[in-house]
Each structure stands twice: as structure tokens, then as C-alpha cells.
Amino acid sequence: MKIIDMLLKKPTLSFEIFPPKNHDGDISSIYKTIDELSALKPDFISVTYGAGGSTTEHTVEIASKIKNQYGIEAVAHLSCIDATSKQLTKILNELKDNNIQNILALRGDYPKDYDPKTAPHEFKYASELNTFINKNYPDTFCLSGACYPEVHQEAVSLEADLEALKKKVDSGAQYLITQLFYDNNYYYRLVREARLKGINVPIIAGIMPATNARSLLNIAKLSGGNIPYNLSASLERFRNNPKAMKEVGLNYATNQIIDLITNGVDGIHLYTMNRPEIAKEILMRTNNIFAEFKND
Ligand code: FAD
């Protein structure tokens, strides 16, 4: 099923996982994660894609298992910054052959070994990947795109980022998933400004529970996001008490989700970091709230 057909009926609950990075290439640990996540009955699970990395091939394999063995819709992430059209065609054929109907089409993060001198330069933006997919695989995939409540780090302004987002949607992104954020006001601003620009597709909120002080600081640095005062104050207070920090993070994310659902969010996408217990804890705290629109 295409995710847009779900979103047109009700808000969605989804989880994001990533292919484990083991030196020996063994990814079997992810299946225990999916076992536990599938029991929570998400509408879909998305699988990240690491451009040029050793985990690239695993995205299709994991997405295929989610869809064909667990019977849950899978969204395969796909990035284009370091790819040739030939490489992308190979992956797109595999996705099609494995019955994967949903792709999160990304420019992607620059790989660590990215070298502009040798890079293919066939694709510069996610919107170009959308155009490529829709031209070569018409009516095959439901495409989605990333968006940034606190503005993408390379964009010169919110206005410029919204112009780019409009192009992404006009080139085929049927819904959007946000970068993580800890201040819901940024999400509400993005939705308001997007609608004013004529971007009318569903915008799913990406939520990452901050259960660990060090990783929260790293993530905020990487994504360029703000940590609101009340969260950073708790982080200072409990940074040496991991169990208390976990409670802070879970309660904070829970309150974010309650506020978003109260205000009519299109969907909640939990960045699980391959830790099903975090998703479980969040759903325990919001069971009756999600029950209003969760699958049976
Ligand atoms: P784009 O939409 O191409 O935008 C990149 C920059 O270019 C922005 O500053 C934008 O404003 C600007 N821009 C875009 N189009 C134009 C245009 N036509 N003219 C001028 N400027 C333009 N990364 C991975 O590598 N693998 C993943 O699996 C992955 N999953 C993600 C999932 C989500 C939900 C999110 C939010 C991000 C994810 N990322 C992933 C990170 C993402 O790849 C990076 O944030 C990357 O820097 C931008 O990707 P994009 O698709 O948003 O790029």
C-alpha cells in the first residue's frame, strides 16, 4: 500500500530504523528489533540508507523483510548525492522486484569519503531524484521527502528552504517527514509557512526521544536543532544519572507527541535508533491517545 493512501485516511504512526553497522556485515540483530517494533503495530517502518557505505545494500534487504515477512508497509530511504543513474536504477529495480512501493527520496548526507573531484555530479538535489524516479518508474512508487522545521543547515533562510521544499513537492514528494525537533513551535511554523507557499501535502513530525545526555548534544549539533531551556535544564541536572535522564527524555517526547496530536499533526515518526524499548515506553504513555488512530 502507498503511504499517501493511509495519510489521506488518518494520521500515521511510524518508526525509523537503520541497518546495523557491523564489521563482519552481520545484520541479524535488526530482526529482533523489527520483531519487537512490529508488535506495536506501526503503519509503516522506514529504513535509512547510507550513501556509499557498507550498509547501502542492506536497506533493500531489510525493507523487503518488513514488507514481505512481517506484512508491515516499508519505506526505503534512498539518497542520490554520490550516486550515478545506473546505480540508482539497480536499486530501484530491486525495490520494485521486492514489492516495495514507498521511497523517502533524499539528496543524502555527504559520505565521509565524498570527493567532489571524483563524485558523479549527476544529482544535486532530492527533487532531481524525484524527477528521475517518476520519469523511469511512472506510477510505481509513492515518494516522500525530508523537511526541516529549524531550516536545513545549508539553506540561507527559511524562505529559501521553503522554495526548495516547494520544488521537492512539485517534483513528486507526496508527503514529508520532518527532521527531529524538540520545540513544537518550529513544526507549527513550518506547517503554517508551507501552507502559505502552497505546499499542501501531509507533514509527518519526526520525534527522537532524548534519553541520553551525550547523544542529545551530538544530535542537536548534527541536525542544527535547538534544545529548549526546560529540556537543557533537566539535562544539566540529570546528566550523570542515566536512568533519570531516560525518564526526562521519554516524558519530554511524550508531551511533544500529545501536543502535536492535540493540534492535528498528520503523523508521528519515531526515530527509534534501533531501540524498540524506547518506542514501547512512548506507546505505553500514549496508548489511548494513539488508539484513536492506530491500526487494529
Ligand atoms: P535537498 O532537498 O536536496 O536539500 C538540500 C539543500 O539544498 C537544502 O539546503 C535545500 O534548501 C537546498 N535545495 C534543495 N533544492 C534546491 C534547489 N532546487 N535550488 C536551490 N537549493 C535547493 N540522510 C542519509 O544519508 N540517509 C538517510 O537515510 C537519511 N534519512 C533521513 C530521513 C529524514 C526524515 C530526514 C529529515 C533526513 C534524512 N537524512 C538522511 C538526512 C538528509 O539526507 C540530509 O539532511 C541532507 O543534508 C539533505 O537531504 P534532502 O533530501 O533534504 O536534500
Image (tube, rainbow, N blue to C red):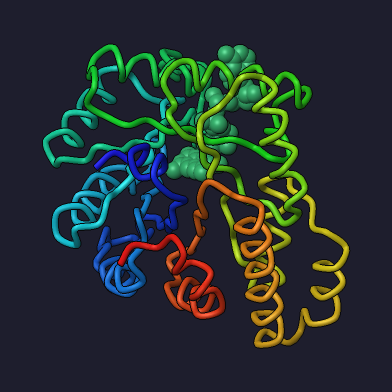
Left or right? Give the position of 286 relative to 73: right
Viewer can see residue 113: no
Image-quadrant location for residue 32: bottom left
Closest to the observer: 37 or 236?
A: 37
Task: Find the residue positioned furthest to the left.
Answer: 97
Q: In which quarter of the image is the C terminus?
A: bottom left
Q: Which residue is pictured at 72% across the width and 57% down the height?
A: 182
Q: Which residue is pictured at 27% across the width and 50% down the height?
A: 73
Closest to the observer: 124 or 172?
A: 172
In this rendering, the answer to whether 14 lies above or below 253 is above
Left or right? Give the position of 289 relative to 119: right
Residue 152: image location, x then y, percent: 68, 33
The total of numbered circles placed on residues is 0
Closest to the observer: 43 or 225?
A: 43
Residue 213: image location, x then y, percent: 71, 71
Residue 171: image location, x then y, percent: 45, 16
Q: In which quarter of the image is the N terminus?
A: top left
Left or right? Give the position of 18 relative to 214: left
Q: Which residue is pictured at 76% across the width and 54% down the height?
A: 183
Q: In which quarter of the image is ligand 1?
A: top right
Residue 14: image location, x then y, percent: 42, 56
Q: Which residue is pictured at 33% across the width and 62% down the height?
A: 295
Image-quadrant location for residue 40: bottom left
In this rendering, the answer to whether 69 lies above or below 116 is below
